[in-house]
Every structure is written in structure tokens, then in C-alpha cells.
């Protein structure tokens, strides 16, 4: 077969694409142009593309789980997480136990103007307090407004999807996302976390020890 | 300019009134033509060829997008570069636009629907179309910008290389039609015959196919559309001669570009595709003053489609390659075309 | 002694001086000497902020000197104050179109120092993501080269189809551009269910994209006229400038780190070939990249079918401290050889990281190759050498 | 740790043997230019070259088939005076102590191929034909408080041009015979050599470290009262029963 000149072939490619965009239904059976289906354009404000579940859109905070241990703040490459807290007294874990003192977060700010979306904070959090959400619509006209506080971060917990199943052959365990909406102080969850990691102390010097390598 | 022109003749208006109406119609037709081509091809067809949607929000299917753009352009600040030659800088877009306005003067769209039926119609069209290069050169020079200067110089070089094949390609048509008058060329095609079969006349694209090809290639270069868009060359000269233009001056360049594409499509239609004449009608039938423009428009859109289709598909040549192509291929080919046409004219 | 000048002689003299001055003015205004043209820092062809200072004679280039640093972020210094996991965040942003591939050599170097080896499943997934980022990166080149030589449409096709690959990367890593997915000792997470089948489909689409590019651009006679015998780099010059990747292979040097110095990923487990082209011109570079993209889709297809089961993380301490030592690991990244020379003194972070980026060396050949070309060729050559600005400036 | 290949896997071993052979071959080729060679098991081959013979050795290596110029850079071996995390508690929290314990020996063991000077040149060459790479080092001795000048290899490997310029601006090394030793990344008027360890990284100095624990303690005088309140509530809720 003689070779078609590349000039004509090229015209063929663009014409074919135009035809496919205009008549996406097979074989042009329907001659009504339907570019909305044929094109790859997503008309953003009108229709929204759903990012994958794992998409690193924004970091959500499950405040009840946070113990202000500063691990995330320290492992942040940009130093963009600011945490302050205070101690409160919490009831004992079981009957007959002593009253414990627990950290409560007063301030948990992430400066999204600095954040590089690396996800290290989410990963290092030993208490399941930070999660990725695919939410992406939080742009602000002023750069200073990108500093989001714990209330805003907690609202995003609602948008955190469940963790995905793995392909066969994986040995990873599928994790669970804590339920949203338990707005009161949840000592039960803290208790679980405590028992899961007995080596980790909640006190600040314990967290420091963890950061320096003793906690492995 | 179309039906209205006939109307004015029939009404026997005074010269000034007739001229005013013609002018008014032309002033409406040219921006409308530019808008239509721009919307249909530059926005929508290009988008479809690239799996996109193009504009959708302004007006039905985004059809008023260009008007919105024009309004936006008008709101922009009018910026002159500090070192620019201000007067020339301001005049350049007007010169370019004037050249495309003047082209519309001789384009016939019906037996009487023509602004001025010049006897030297083609000659005039070729002459005024090359005026635009003057404007481009002015823009390139006056911008005091190296990119713009390179673009302007490229445009000048391109003009010399392409004006020649353009005119030589037209020569074949002129020889065959025995006239420089565009109306007469349409008549020659309408009354011609293909081996005794005269129903569809004899569109010169059949006998002057090589001429048509050369005309289209040269027109592409004249319009600085893509394989020959070196004067603009976004990725090397960042816009070439109009790099310093903003706001409504840039709008004028843009309008001129699309309007000239329209005009050249119309010229190709008149010379090669039989113009406004519809097979089966008497050449002077008054109804053609109404139907002619419609037929003409359809043919123009077809030719313009090809022009833009090529524009969206092809990469751009280099200036020296273009010169080589023009002087070593197109000009000898068009000369041969003239010789062959002449021989046939004498023999037949 | 000359007689005192008469009035008329004075006038003549003044007229002569004035004429000379006018001539001089005209000569200054119409200086026909060389012209300096700055291509960039803001220029559509430099995809970023590279500046090329050209001396032109007409449209011919006398000399072209790339001036960079507009985007220098000092990553080598920044890495010195960061821990190893934090470094990958920065390293993502070196060649931002093929980010995952950037992480791999750094992680491998750290693993080498620690004496850790990632489990096979992690290595396979690494290789898959590596090749996916190659496809995402190079497919953009395949379209972008069209824009460089003036064709509008190919780049839209490239963006359209690259998006599919980026979606696949995002589905696994959570990041379209900056995956930050590689960890010392393995990977952050395993692949989600259904991903393998989807990726197979995307690979088929990408092969279609390669065919389209071949018809639309590479087969186009105008494109060939623009690219053939433009920017010819002979093999020995390419070697002495340290050109790597497709630029080197287009000069006829059969050298691919994936095959020749496999640092422990799964490339030796699958069947593929290295493409070379003898010409060394811009067209050869385009041709080689097109073939490599096709080859990469085949590699991915084969790897997807053979992912071994098992863990994705080797046993590494929670807080990573790398033993003292030095290591250099380089891999065949989309742009060429990217290597990290990591010096550790036993701390949480590297003591010194030398980042050997492909674009830096690839662009260093520009002054040599651009002499005597024309202004449009500058763009063709820059486009065909294919650099990412973050990869030059680091 | 120099030549210990005892517990390597077989394929690594083959590679190491090849590297050993290459080291021996190159040592012979370069003669007394090679000060020291080092093969790290399963990794790489280092050659340390006498700085006086840097140029000649590079030319000899190129002619021996190592024609692919990988990179050229330098290493500043001094410790940063401020520590890794300036003004932070990160270093203090364990890391620093650990370093101190090993720092006495770290200096000797860390350098592949040995060497004592503050600055070391570092380059890598590849042989495409032999699929082998070699890392080359050279000690840059101090001269009058600054590093001594180094012969440029721009005429051996044309690609060394930019790499030498980069090493010049980042480390302050001077390359004799380089025609255009100007800044490549930094502004012309920039002062200092950023990759030297004594060049402070201001980004870390101007901002306070956010990792400092900021937890408000319960005032001691309230502690007993709060404890009693919580306990009372706990017992009242019935959980204590």
C-alpha cells in the first residue's frame, strides 16, 4: 500500500478528532452533535471532577484524637503546623484507677500557603488524628486567609472517604476512618490509642523522645 | 453591501446616500464576517479538533464570546512602549484593517450586489491586499521591540516571496476568463461548459486546479496562517509584530486577520468555485441578489474551513525554507501553469 | 599658516560637520552589526524561566548562552537541614513532570547506605510508577514539541492523554504531580483494588496517542523539514557534555541505565529494548522519545501482570537514621540520568546531597549546538533537548 | 570497612570483583596519581587522585573509555557551626548526643577513599562500552585560608564548564584555566558560597521552630480541686461501679 503523505494523514487526525468530539456515539449513528460527551472538558463551576479517594486535597483534623504531641509539627518540612494546648484532668480508664492528665488542643493551625502537601504529618501521627481529604475548594483571595484553624480542619473530616481496598496480593491492612461528629471530648478513643502504643507517653517530653528516635 | 446595493440602485438614491448605505453595510459585514469565522473556526472547530468544548457560557453555545472579548479589549489600557514611534505605532493596525476593508469593495455577491464593480477588480484586490504587509512592517518597526522587528522583517520577506505566486496563480484565471473584472470572471464560469456539459457551468477549480492550489498556499502565507505564520510565531517571536499591542489595537489586528481570511476565501470562491452564481438560474436574475450572498457564504465557509483546518494541524516552516519553497517550487509551477493555460487558450 | 576661513567656507564646514553628524546618527540608528536577543526569561519556549542570550546576525545565531538561576531553589542546601523523609518532598519538585522518578534514586541511595532492600512487591510497584511518570513526562514532550515548531493541536492531545496517566498515578499516590510515595525501605501504601485493570486500559490509550502523534506530527513533512539535521549532536560530543537519556541515545550511543546499571528495580524482569537513532538531530530525539514512550507502555503492561504478592515495606526503624557513608545512585529518568550523591554522617538527615540532574547537563550543550543556526532553530533545539526548568536550576 | 565483601550475595559479588579488577586496572593506568582506591561492597568504586595530577588523570580516564562525563562537584566536610536545626530543640533532643558519641570515629569512616582536607572535589565518569562507572575524588588543600586553585578539565570534558562554575559559586573553588568562571545560578553581586557549611541558611534562622511544646500546665493550686471534680463526675456517671 502506498504511503499517504504525512500532510494528509495529519489533516485526517484532526478531522477524526473533531468528528469524535462532535459525534461521540459509535459510527455516527446519531447525527446530533454531542460535544459535551465527546470532549474531555470538565466545565468546572457547573460540573465537578471527583478526585480519587486518595487524593491529597486538604488535611482534615480529628480533633478528639489529637494529643498535641507535636510530632506532625516537627516532621513538617515547611514548619507550617502550629499547635498549642493545655492540660485537663480526665477520668481514670477503669474503676479504681487514678485521674489522668490529658492534653487538649487549643490551637491547631495549618498554613496552607506554606504546606507542600507531602503528607508526612498524616503519616507520622500516632493517634489517627490527621487524614487526607480530596476536598479542593478552599482557595482564598488573601494569602493570610489560608491559615486554617482547628475548627475548619475538623469540618473537613466530613469529607474524608473510607480507605480503599487493596489489589490482591497485598498484605496491607485496610485502615478505618474514625466517625465524624463525636464532638465531645472522647477519652475512650484516647484510651485505645494509649493501649495500642504503650511506649508512647502523652507528655511533651515523651513526644520529644519519640521524635529523637527513642520511640521506635 | 449585498442586497442593499441593488436596492439603492432600484430606488435611484443620490450618490452620497448610496455610498453611505454601501459603507454602512460594509462596516457591518466585515466585523460580522470576522466574528463568524472567529467563532466558528477559531473557537469552536479548533476546540473540537482538540477534544475540547471551546466557549460555552456567553450566549448560546458560547456564540457571543468574541463580543465579550471585544468588550474586554476595549476596556484595556492603551499602552505604548516608551521607545515606540507613537504615530506609526498607532497607525499600523489601522493600515492593516483598512487593507482588509478595501478588499471587500470589489467582491461581487450577486448580479448587482457589489460595492464597486471595477474593471480591474483582481488587480485592485491583489494591490490592496498587499497593503496589510505595510501595516505589519510599520507595527514591527514602531514597536521598538526586537521580536516585533524580526516579525515585521519576516513579514516583508514573506510578502515578496508570496505575492508573486499569488498573482501568477490568478493569471491563469484571468487568461481563461478574458477579464480582470471579478463579475466577468463569475460570468465566465457560469457560462462556461465542461466538454459541452454546461449545467453547472465551468468552475475554474476544474481547469485551474494547480492555480487553485497555488492560490490557496500563497493565501495561507499572505494571511500568515500556520504553516507560514513566521511573522507571528508565538513560540519563537512571542507574537511577532503585534507583541507590544494591547487592548483595542490588538483587537484591530485580530479582526483584520480574520476578516482578511474571509476576504481571501471570498476571492478564491469568486475565482475558482463559481462565485455567487447558482446553476440553473439566469446570470442576471434579480433573485440572485438575495440568493447569491447565501451561496457565496456557504462556499466561503468551506474555503475558510480548509484554511483554518490546515492552520490547526500543521507546524510552521522556517523562513528560509519558505523562501526556498516559494521561489523554487511555487513560482516555476505557476509560470508553467500560465504557459499551459495560454497554449490551451490559443489552441482551443 | 592657512588663511582665515571666509564666511562661505565656514558655512561649508558647518554643513559638512552637520552632514557627518547626521550620517553618524543614521549609522547608529541603522546599526547593521550584531543584535542581542534575549529569549526568555519569560518566553513560551522556555517552559519556565530560562534565559538564552543570543547574539544574532540577521536571524543567524552567532552565540547563544543560557543564563539560568531564575528558579534556583538551593535544594542541595535545603536538603542539608531536612530529614530523609522530608527531603523527598523537595526532590519531588526537581523534575515536576516526572516526580515519582525523582524520588527513586534518592531513596535507593539512602537504602544503599542503610543496607536495606525493599521487598519485591514494592520494587515492582516502584518500577511501574517510575515508568508511568516517564510516560506522563515524555508524552507531554511529544505534544509540546509540536507547539515549539508551531503546530497547535498536538499539545492539546498530549495534555488530554497525559491526564489519564496522571489520574492513575494520583489514584495510587494521592498526588498528581508530587506523589511523595517512595519511602526508605518500600512504599507508603499498596495499590488500590481495580487499579491494575484501569492502568492496562490507559496504557492501550497511550499507545493510541503515540500512533496519533506519529501521524499528526512525526510523519508530517513540514515537521521533518524543521527538525531533520537541525541541532546535530555527534555521539562523542554528547558524551563529553554528559548528555543523557533520549538525547544521548538519539546520538547513537546505546546507553540506558535501566538496562546497564539497574540499581535494583524490576526492569530486568521484563522484556523490552533500548531504542537508539544514529542521526543525533532534533528529529532523532523526537523519534527516540516516541519509541521509548511506546516501549514504556509495554513495560508497564508486563509489570502489571507480574506484581508479586507480599509486603510493601521492609523492616526499617520508625525514625530513620542513616549510617555514615557515601553513596551515589543514578537512574534513567524521563529526562536522562538523575543521580544523588548522598553523604551521611549518621544523622537524621543527609550531610550533603549532590543532585546530578539530567537537564543541567543536557542544556550545557546549547552554546555548542546553537552556533550558526537560525532563530526558529533555537526553539526547535531547545524543545528537542527537552528540559524542565526545575531540573536545571534545582 | 574498606574491602569487606564477606557477606555479599553472589551477583553483588561478581559486580564487586569486577569493580576490584577495575580499580586495580585504573590504579595501574594512572600510576602514582591514584592516592587511594576504595570499593564499597555492592555499590561503587572510588578513586582518590592527587590534585596535582587531576587534569592528566581525567584525560587518561577519558582515553581509557570513560568518556561519559557524569558530574563534577565538591564536598565541604566541616560541620555546620550552628548545628542542623538552628535555634531548635531538635538537635538537643537526643540526636546531637548520639552524634557526639560517634563523631570521634565518624570522620575517619565516613569518607570513601579517605582524605583529610576540608574541601574535596568529586566527579563521576562512565564508560558506556564497559557499563562501568567510577567516582573520582581529589583533596583540595587550603592555601592562605581559602581552598587552593584546582586545574580545570574543561578541555578534557567540555561539559565540565557549567559544573565547575557551579562548584565555584557554591564552594568558592577556583578552577585554573576556566575561561568564564562566573556565577551560574546566583546574581553576579551575590557574596558568599552557599553550600559551604559555614554559610547560614536564613530560612531556618528567621522563623521560630514550631515544634516547641506549648502546653499550658494546670496551675498546681487547682490540681487537687480539678481532680476531685473529675473523679466525682466519673463516679456519678456510674462507670466507676
Image: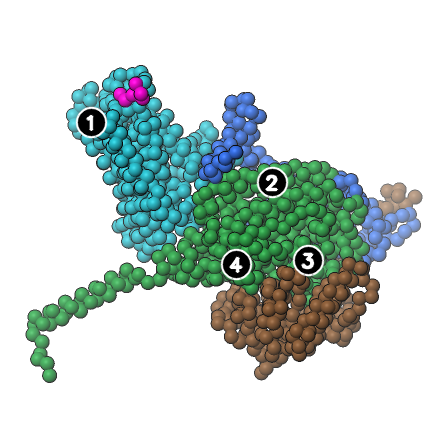
Which chain is depicted brown?
Answer: D
Q: Earlier in the sequence, mark 3 or mark 2?
A: 2
Q: CA distance from mark 4 to mark 2?
A: 31 Å
The answer to whether tags 2 and 1 share a subunit is no
SS state under label 3: loop
- The colour with which the image depicts chain A is blue
Rate crowding at label 2 as few (under 14), some (14 to 19) or many (20 or more) other CA atoms within 10 Å. many
- Front of the two marks 2 and 1: 2
- Front of the two marks 4 and 3: 4
User: Relative to residue C363, is residue A93 depicted above or below?
Assistant: above
- Front of the two marks 4 and 2: 4
Q: Which residue is the site of mark 1?
A: B18
SS state under label 1: helix
The answer to whether tags 4 and 2 share a subunit is yes
> Which disc is residue C206 wearing?
2
> Which disc is residue C234 wearing?
4
Q: CA distance from mark 3 to mark 2?
A: 27 Å
Amino acid at each position: 500500500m502506498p504511503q499517504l503523505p504525512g500532510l494528509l494523514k495529519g489533516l485526517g487526525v484532526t478531522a477524526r478528532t473533531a468528528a469524535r468530539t462532535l459525534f461521540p456515539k459509535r459510527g455516527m449513528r446519531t447525527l446530533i452533535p454531542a460535544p459535551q460527551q465527546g470532549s474531555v472538558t470538565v466545565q468546572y463551576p457547573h460540573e465537578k471532577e471527583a478526585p480519587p479517594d486518595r487524593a491529597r486535597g486538604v488535611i482534615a483534623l480529628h480533633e478528639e484524637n489529637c494529643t498535641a504531641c507535636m510530632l506532625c509539627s516537627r516532621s513538617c518540612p515547611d514548619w507550617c503546623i502550629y499547635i498549642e494546648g493545655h492540660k485537663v484532668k480526665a477520668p481514670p480508664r477503669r474503676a479504681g484507677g487514678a485521674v489522668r492528665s490529658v492534653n487538649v488542643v487549643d490551637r491547631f493551625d495549618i498554613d496552607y500557603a506554606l504546606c507542600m502537601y507531602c503528607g508526612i504529618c498524616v503519616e507520622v501521627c500516632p493517634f489517627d488524628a490527621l487524614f487526607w481529604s480530596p476536598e479542593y475548594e478552599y482557595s482564598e483571595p488573601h494569602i493570610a486567609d489560608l491559615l486554617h484553624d482547628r475548627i475548619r480542619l475538623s469540618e473537613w473530616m466530613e469529607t474524608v472517604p473510607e480507605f480503599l481496598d487493596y489489589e490482591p496480593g497485598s498484605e496491607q491492612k485496610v485502615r478505618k476512618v474514625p466517625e465524624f461528629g463525636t464532638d465531645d471530648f472522647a477519652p475512650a478513643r484516647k484510651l485505645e490509642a494509649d493501649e495500642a502504643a504503650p511506649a508512647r507517653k502523652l507528655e511533651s517530653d515523651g513526644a520529644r523522645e519519640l521524635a529523637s528516635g527513642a520511640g521506635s | 453591501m449585498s442586497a442593499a446595493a441593488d436596492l439603492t440602485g432600484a430606488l435611484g438614491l443620490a450618490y452620497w446616500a448610496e455610498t453611505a448605505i454601501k459603507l454602512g453595510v460594509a462596516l457591518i459585514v466585515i466585523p460580522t464576517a470576522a466574528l463568524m469565522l472567529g467563532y466558528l473556526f477559531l473557537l469552536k472547530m479548533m476546540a473540537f479538533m482538540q477534544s475540547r468544548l471551546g466557549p460555552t457560557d456567553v450566549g448560546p453555545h458560547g456564540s457571543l464570546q468574541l463580543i465579550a472579548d471585544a468588550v474586554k479589549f476595549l476596556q484595556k489600557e492603551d499602552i505604548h512602549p516608551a521607545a515606540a514611534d507613537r504615530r506609526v505605532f498607532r497607525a499600523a493596525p489601522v493600515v492593516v484593517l483598512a487593507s482588509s476593508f478595501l478588499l471587500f469593495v470589489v467582491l461581487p455577491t450577486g448580479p448587482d450586489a457589489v460595492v464597486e464593480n471595477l474593471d480591474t477588480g483582481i488587480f485592485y484586490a491583489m494591490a490592496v491586499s498587499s497593503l496589510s504587509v505595510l501595516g505589519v512592517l510599520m507595527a514591527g518597526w514602531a514597536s521598538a521591540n526586537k521580536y516585533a522587528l524580526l516579525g515585521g522583517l519576516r513579514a516583508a520577506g514573506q510578502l515578496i516571496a508570496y505575492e508573486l505566486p499569488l498573482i501568477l496563480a490568478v493569471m491563469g484565471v484571468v487568461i481563461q476568463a478574458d477579464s480582470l473584472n471579478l463579475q466577468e470572471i463569475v460570468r465566465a464560469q457560469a457560462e462556461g461548459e465542461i466538454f459541452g456539459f454546461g449545467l453547472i457551468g465551468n468552475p475554474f477549480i476544474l481547469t485551474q486546479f494547480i492555480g487553485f492550489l497555488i492560490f490557496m498556499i500563497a493565501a495561507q502565507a499572505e494571511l500568515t496562517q500556520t504553516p507560514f505564520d513566521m511573522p507571528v510565531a508565538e513560540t519563537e517571536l512571542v507574537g511577532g509584530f503585534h507583541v507590544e499591542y494591547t487592548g483595542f489595537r490588538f483587537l484591530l489586528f485580530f479582526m483584520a486577520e480574520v476578516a482578511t481570511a474571509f476576504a481571501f476565501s471570498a476571492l478564491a470562491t469568486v475565482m475558482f468555485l463559481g462565485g455567487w452564481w447558482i446553476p440553473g438560474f439566469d446570470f442576471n436574475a434579480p433573485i440572485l441578489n438575495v440568493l447569491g450572498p447565501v451561496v457565496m457564504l456557504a462556499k466561503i465557509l468551506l474555503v475558510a474551513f480548509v484554511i483554518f483546518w490546515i492552520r490547526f494541524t500543521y507546524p510552521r516552516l522556517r523562513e528560509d525554507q519558505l523562501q526556498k519553497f516559494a521561489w523554487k517550487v511555487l513560482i516555476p509551477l505557476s509560470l508553467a501553469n500560465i504557459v499551459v493555460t495560454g497554449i490551451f487558450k490559443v489552441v482551443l | 599658516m592657512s588663511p582665515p576661513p571666509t564666511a562661505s567656507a565656514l558655512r561649508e564646514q558647518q554643513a559638512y560637520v552637520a552632514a557627518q553628524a547626521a550620517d553618524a546618527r543614521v549609522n547608529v540608528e541603522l546599526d547593521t552589526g550584531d543584535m542581542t536577543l534575549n529569549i526568555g526569561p519569560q518566553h513560551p519556549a522556555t517552559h519556565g524561566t530560562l534565559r538564552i542570550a543570543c547574539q544574532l546576525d540577521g536571524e543567524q545565531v552567532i552565540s547563544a548562552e543560557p543564563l539560568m538561576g531564575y528558579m534556583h531553589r538551593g535544594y542541595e542546601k535545603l536538603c542539608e537541614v531536612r530529614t530523609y523523609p522530608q527531603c523527598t518532598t523537595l526532590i519531588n519538585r526537581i523534575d515536576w513532570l516526572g516526580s515519582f522518578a525523582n524520588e527513586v534514586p534518592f531513596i535507593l541511595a539512602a537504602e544503599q547506605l542503610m543496607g536495606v532492600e525493599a521487598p519485591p512487591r514494592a520494587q515492582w510497584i516502584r518500577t511501574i510508577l517510575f515508568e508511568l511518570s516517564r510516560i506522563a513526562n515524555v508524552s507531554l514532550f511529544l505534544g509540546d514539541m509540536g507547539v515549539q515548531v508551531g503546530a497547535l493541536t498536538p499539545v492539546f492531545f498530549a495534555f488530554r492523554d497525559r491526564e489519564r496517566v496522571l489520574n492513575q498515578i494520583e489514584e495510587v499516590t494521592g498526588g498528581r504531580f508530587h506523589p511523595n510515595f517512595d519511602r526508605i525501605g518500600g512504599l507508603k501504601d499498596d495499590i488500590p483494588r481495580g487499579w491494575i485493570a484501569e492502568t492496562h486500559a490507559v496504557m492501550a490509550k497511550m499507545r493510541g496517542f503515540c500512533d496519533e502523534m506519529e501521524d499528526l506530527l512525526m510523519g508530517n513533512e513540514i515537521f521533518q523539514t524543521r527538525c531533520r539535521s537541525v541541532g546535530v549532536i555527534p555521539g562523542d560530543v554528547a558524551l563529553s557534555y554528559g548528555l543523557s537519556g533520549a538525547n544521548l541515545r538519539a546520538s547513537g550511543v546505546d546507553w540506558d541505565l535501566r538496562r546497564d546499571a539497574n540499581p535494583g528495580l524490576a526492569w530486568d524482569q521484563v522484556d523490552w529494548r533500548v531504542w537508539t537513532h544514529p542521526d543525533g538531530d532534533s528529529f532523532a530525539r523526537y523519534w527516540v522519545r516516541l519509541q521509548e514512550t511506546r516501549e514504556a507502555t509495554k513495560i508497564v503492561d508486563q509489570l502489571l501482570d507480574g506484581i508479586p504478592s507480599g509486603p510493601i515495606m521492609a523492616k526499617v526503624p520508625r525514625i530513620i537514621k542513616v549510617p555514615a557513608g557515601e553513596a551515589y545512585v543514578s537512574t534513567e529518568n524521563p529526562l536522562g540520568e538523575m543521580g544523588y550523591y548522598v553523604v551521611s554522617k549518621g544523622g537524621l538527615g543527609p550531610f550533603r546531597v549532590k543532585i546530578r540532574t539530567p537537564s543541567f547537563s543536557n542544556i550545557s550543550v546549547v552554546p555548542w549546538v546553537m552556533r550558526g543556526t537560525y532563530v526558529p532553530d533555537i526553539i526547535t533545539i531547545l524543545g528537542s533537548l527537552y528540559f524542565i526548568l526545575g531540573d536545571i536550576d534545582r | 570497612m574498606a574491602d569487606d565483601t564477606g557477606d555479599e550475595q553472589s551477583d553483588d559479588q561478581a559486580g564487586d570483583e569486577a569493580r576490584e579488577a577495575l580499580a586495580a586496572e585504573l590504579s595501574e593506568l594512572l600510576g602514582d596519581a591514584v592516592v587511594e582506591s576504595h570499593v564499597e561492597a555492592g555499590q561503587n568504586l572510588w578513586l582518590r587522585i592527587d590534585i596535582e595530577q587531576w587534569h592528566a588523570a581525567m584525560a587518561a580516564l577519558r582515553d581509557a573509555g570513560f568518556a561519559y562525563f557524569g558530574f563534577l562537584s565538591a564536598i565541604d566536610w566541616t560541620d555546620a557551626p550552628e548545628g542542623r536545626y538552628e535555634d531548635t530543640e531538635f538537635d538537643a533532643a537526643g540526636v546531637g548526643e548520639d552524634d557526639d558519641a560517634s563523631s570521634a570515629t565518624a570522620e575517619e569512616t565516613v569518607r570513601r577513599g579517605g582524605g583529610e582536607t576540608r574541601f574535596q572535589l568529586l566527579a563521576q565518569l562512565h564508560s558506556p562500552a564497559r557499563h562501568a562507572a567510577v567516582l573520582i575524588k581529589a583533596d583540595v588543600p587550603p592555601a592562605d585560608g581559602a581552598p587552593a586553585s584546582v586545574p580545570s578539565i574543561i578541555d578534557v570534558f567540555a561539559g565540565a564548564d557549567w559544573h565547575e562554575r557551579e562548584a565555584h559559586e557554591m564552594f568558592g573553588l577556583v578552577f585554573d584555566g576556566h575561561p568564564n568562571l562566573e556565577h551560574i545560578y546566583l546574581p553576579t553581586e551575590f557574596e558568599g558560597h552557599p553550600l559551604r557549611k559555614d554559610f547560614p541558611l536564613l530560612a531556618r534562622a528567621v522563623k521560630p521552630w514550631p515544634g516547641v511544646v506549648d502546653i499550658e500546665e494546670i496551675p498546681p493550686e487547682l490540681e487537687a480541686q480539678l481532680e476531685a471534680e473529675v473523679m466525682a463526675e466519673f463516679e456519678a456517671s456510674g462507670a466507676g461501679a
